[in-house]
Image (cartoon, coloured by chain):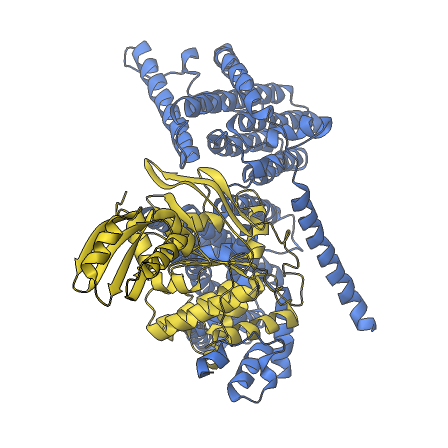
Chain colours: A blue, B yellow
């Protein structure tokens, strides 16, 4: 038997490490760790996302991370020395912490807002580019695990970078002039922005399946990062110098509410982006539509709920603003949803609702443009009704404002039903055979339609006044922006007959479009659920049983 | 080298060695059910029919060779089988589970080694395998055992700490195979695994595949190196322009495609008499004489050969050599395919 044969002999039933071999010892050490601390870390890492473990290992060996980390330490040290030396004569009594804190935060945002999102983008894009994503997707990792792993890596990098400036920030507190609340506020802004930018970067990388798209999205991301950095750096500077405090909550009420609401919406749309990215990189036959519709619906309802709360407790006019936000939310989501392909795979059919109640409430979650259209229109209507009622729940009871809100809500809902209805019909007529990019094309089609409507109404308005001026007339109703700007509700405002006529005309043209779409959506709804084969059910059951056995063993073991 | 014995087609295979942990496939459907099944598989890219109505079955422990020229549709059908692509029509099954409808169950049972090997930078072999073991849900000791077993099997244990970027092509292929088998799949799909390997690495890879098959793993392997496939495959499928032209064991295909045998007879003397005698026999045609040797085509198979030889000897002809030309897999491939591309 040759040497090769001995290597390639039968699979060892016991680990080869039992043989005295220096290399085997190395394998043992590499796998189990050398020190007790290593062993403990490896043990804990069992519960971590594999991508986090892998990318942390890679990052620790990468030059980019070493350089960024090293440079950050050097710059932070230099800034500390400079700041302390410049304030030495007055260091015992002057409030010099603010300037130093501002400097540290501006240093931190460079890796946090510029480098980390770019690293996330490259990491995801290179998986798709290099073909490693395919081998990764063949494992038991679900798309959501992959996206979450990448996001975890961004969070970990941020923690590492923040750990560099943490002692320095403590120093600024000791130097006086900086409150703990200010530090907390600033760090929350940095963390939320970093995670949001990283999520956007990962989503962009998931969308860009071709080299050309990758370049486009990369440029868009850079632009977004720069805009965010410049905008929020001024916010960080302002907050660092002025300070915010819990003690003076009334004075800083707007800042804290703005931070809370912004954080809430950033989190919400990160969830939506997360669902979209996971759907994009998932198995093609899976039902990717329903997992996106759920966060969209939750986001829509939360917009409405936050709007209602703000209208009741902060300002009644918040209802109008949040109604507008709700309209934008459903207009953007709907533009893509109505472009969905009507095809439902056998795999997706197994997950369709069954029974009277689930059919009644769950049918609008069935993938397809028809159900999608009705889902968007109904969801927008539901949120609008909640927001419409909110002015009546305040102590002010501004009836004029309420009537203006009702007209505004009707107009928004009619525009959603009108444009998305035409978009869905257009996709059905013109893009039926299109297999990829259909959703994006439909969204572009709706935008173009909207632009044409704006152009046509402006031209007609000019023509009606003999090219002397541009006044709003009833025939301008296809122009959503102009009409909504005319009827936007604010305190002590009444709608006039012209505006009501425009909304009425809009209703007249929307009704047949809505009914036609409703009729067409029947095609999506009649699809029946098919039963999952027994063997597949048994296999899933077996897996669940195995998992529960494993868990119970883990509980029993320490007792033993 | 002698311990790798070929199993006859359809012969029962030993049970696979079991591993601890729940990630393992602990049972197969039934012993008689095919582990790999392609059922009327179609895949169109625009007007191009990359895969056109391909159907075949591979049973447990068999090695199936997938042969075809470049662009024939091998990789596409392998990718569909591996749940990486969807078919335009038809379905592919692993252990009875549909690659289209139950990809998660298929992936649990499948190890796929693609044509190209993409690596992660700043990683060594052990970290690479550790990552994939974690990705298959292996935890703690199960994972460590699986990595050790894979490193031992692929012979990578001595370079476990070496960065992947510094590995030779052969070592990378081993690592890729290790990655595909880390979760002990019951089915392995290997796309051109021997591509670019030196002869030694190729032989070693072949031995690994044979050993895996001997332990019950079903292997679907594509290759351009037909002699390699002929030696290790129980069955082969020949595909061209998306269509499966022939499927079965090499011998079966050979038997099916040939209507006649080419026979060479070298008599001690009486060449002319033998030629006349042969020309009068039924089933003999295309008679030609080259020196001492007489070449002719004989209708039929081995039984006809034997009958003819017996008759020649009984007729008193002094026969030194009687040989039917055995076609190699290469000959079969060249005869079946036309070399056309789409």
Residue A161 shows in the view? no
Q: Nearer the viewer, residue A91 or B304?
A: B304
Q: Is residue A535 visible?
A: yes
Rendering coords of residue A487 (x, y %): 50, 21
Q: Position of residue A99 (x, y in %)?
A: 48, 65
Residue A63 in percent (x, y) is at: 39, 72
Above or below, A555 against A370 in this view is below
Q: Quadrant of residue A304?
A: top right
Viewer-proximal residue, A22 or A154? A22
* Residue A443 coordinates in the image, percent (x, y): 42, 31
Q: How many marks?
A: 0
Between A305 and A138, the one lying in front of the other is A138
For this view, does B162 lie left or right of residue B105? left
In the image, residue A477 sits, relative to residue A394, either above or below, namely: above
Q: Residue at x 25, y 64 (%)?
A: B266
Q: Please tell me which residue lies in front, B50 or B282.
A: B282
Kindly indicate the quadrant of the structure image that contains residue B264.
bottom left
A265 in relation to A102, above or below: above
- Image height of B93 relative to A513, above or below: below
Q: Is residue A483 left or right of residue B10?
A: left
Quadrant the C terminus of chain B occupies: top left
Which residue corresponds to the image point at 55% horizontal and 85% vertical from the top-left?
A25
Residue at the image position 42 percent from the left and 49 percent from the top? B247
Which quarter of the rendered picture does the N terminus of chain B lie within?
bottom left
Q: Furthest residue to the left?
A: B291
């Amino acid at each position: 038997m040759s040497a090769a044969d001995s290597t390639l002999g039968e699979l060892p039933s016991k680990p080869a490490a039992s043989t005295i071999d220096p290399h085997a010892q190395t394998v043992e050490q590499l796998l189990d760790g050398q020190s007790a601390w290593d062993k403990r870390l490896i043990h804990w890492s069992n519960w971590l996302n594999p991508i986090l473990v892998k990318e942390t290992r890679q990052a620790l060996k990468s030059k980019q991370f070493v350089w960024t980390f090293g440079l950050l330490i050097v710059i932070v040290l230099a800034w500390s020395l400079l700041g302390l030396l410049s304030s030495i004569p007055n260091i015992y009594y002057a409030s010099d912490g603010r300037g130093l804190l501002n400097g540290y935060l501006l240093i931190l945002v460079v890796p946090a807002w510029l480098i980390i999102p770019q690293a996330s983008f490259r990491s995801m894009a290179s998986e798709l580019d290099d073909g490693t994503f395919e081998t990764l997707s063949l494992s038991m990792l679900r798309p959501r695990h992959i996206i979450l792993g990448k996001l975890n890596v961004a969070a970990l990098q941020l923690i590492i970078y923040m750990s560099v400036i943490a002692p320095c920030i403590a120093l600024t507190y000791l130097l006086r002039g900086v409150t703990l609340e200010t530090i907390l506020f600033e760090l929350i802004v940095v963390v939320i922005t970093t995670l949001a930018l990283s999520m956007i970067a990962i989503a962009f990388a998931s969308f860009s399946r071709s080299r050309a798209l990758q370049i486009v999205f990369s440029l868009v991301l850079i632009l977004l990062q720069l805009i965010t950095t410049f905008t929020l750096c001024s916010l960080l500077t302002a907050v660092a110098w002025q300070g915010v405090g819990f003690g003076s909550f009334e004075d800083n009420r707007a800042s804290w509410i703005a931070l809370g609401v912004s954080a809430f919406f950033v989190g919400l749309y990160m969830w939506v982006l997360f669902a979209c990215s996971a759907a994009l990189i998932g198995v093609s036959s899976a039902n990717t539509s329903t997992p996106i519709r759920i966060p969209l619906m939750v986001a829509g309802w939360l917009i409405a709920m936050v709007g209602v709360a703000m209208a009741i407790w902060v300002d009644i006019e918040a209802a109008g603003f949040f109604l507008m936000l709700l309209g934008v939310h459903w207009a953007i989501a709907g533009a893509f949803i109505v472009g969905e392909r009507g095809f439902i795979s056998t795999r997706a059919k197994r997950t369709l609702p069954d029974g009277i109640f689930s059919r009644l409430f769950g049918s609008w979650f069935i993938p397809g443009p028809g159900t999608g259209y009705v889902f968007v229109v109904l969801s927008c209507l539901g949120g609008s009704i909640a927001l419409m009622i909110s002015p009546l729940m305040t102590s002010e009871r501004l009836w004029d404002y309420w009537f203006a809100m009702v007209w505004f809500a009707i107009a928004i809902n009619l525009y959603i039903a009108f444009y998305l209805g035409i978009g869905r019909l257009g996709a059905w007529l013109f893009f039926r055979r299109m297999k990829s990019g259909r959703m994006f094309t439909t969204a572009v089609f709706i935008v173009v339609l909207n632009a044409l409507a704006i152009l046509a109404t402006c031209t007609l308005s000019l023509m009606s006044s003999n090219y002397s001026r541009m006044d709003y007339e009833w025939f301008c109703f296809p122009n959503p922006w102009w009409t909504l700007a005319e009827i936007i509700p604010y305190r002590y405002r009444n709608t006039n007959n012209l505006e009501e006529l425009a909304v009425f005309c809009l209703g007249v043209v929307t009704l047949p479009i809505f009914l036609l779409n409703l009729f067409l959506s029947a095609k999506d709804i009649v699809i029946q659920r098919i039963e999952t084969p027994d063997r597949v059910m048994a296999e899933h059951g077996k897996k669940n049983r195995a998992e529960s056995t494993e868990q119970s063993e883990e509980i029993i073991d320490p007792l033993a | 080298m002698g311990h790798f014995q070929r199993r006859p087609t359809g012969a029962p295979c030993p049970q696979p060695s079991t591993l601890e942990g729940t990630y393992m496939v602990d049972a197969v459907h039934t012993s008689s059910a095919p582990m790999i099944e392609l059922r009327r598989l179609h895949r169109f890219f625009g007007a191009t029919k990359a895969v056109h109505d391909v159907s075949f079955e591979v049973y447990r422990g068999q090695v199936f060779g997938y042969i075809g020229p470049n662009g024939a549709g091998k990789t596409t059908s392998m990718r569909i089988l591996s749940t990486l692509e969807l078919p335009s029509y038809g379905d592919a099954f692993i252990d009875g589970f549909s690659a289209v409808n139950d990809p998660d169950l298929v992936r649990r049972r499948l190890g796929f080694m693609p044509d190209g090997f993409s690596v992660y930078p700043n990683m060594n072999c052990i970290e690479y395998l550790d990552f994939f073991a974690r990705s298959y849900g292996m935890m703690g000791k199960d994972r460590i055992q699986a990595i050790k077993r894979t490193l031992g099997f692929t012979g990578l244990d001595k370079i476990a700490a070496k960065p992947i970027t510094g590995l030779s092509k052969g070592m990378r292929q081993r690592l890729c195979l290790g990655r595909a088998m880390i979760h002990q799949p019951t089915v392995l799909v290997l796309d051109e695994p021997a591509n670019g390997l030196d002869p030694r690495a190729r032989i070693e890879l072949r031995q690994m595949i044979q050993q895996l098959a001997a332990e019950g793993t079903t292997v679907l392997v594509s290759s351009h190196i037909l002699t390699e496939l002929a030696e290790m495959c129980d069955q082969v499928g020949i595909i061209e322009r998306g269509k499966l032209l022939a499927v079965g064991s090499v011998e079966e295909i050979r038997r099916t495609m040939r209507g006649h045998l080419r026979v060479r007879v070298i008599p001690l003397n009486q060449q002319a008499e033998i030629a006349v005698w042969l020309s009068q026999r039924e089933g003999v045609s295309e008679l030609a004489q080259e020196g001492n040797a007489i070449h002719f085509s004989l209708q039929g198979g081995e039984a006809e050969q034997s009958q003819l030889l017996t008759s020649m000897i009984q007729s008193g002809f002094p026969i030194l050599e009687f040989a039917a030309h055995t076609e190699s897999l290469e000959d079969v491939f060249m005869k079946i395919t036309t070399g056309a591309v789409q």
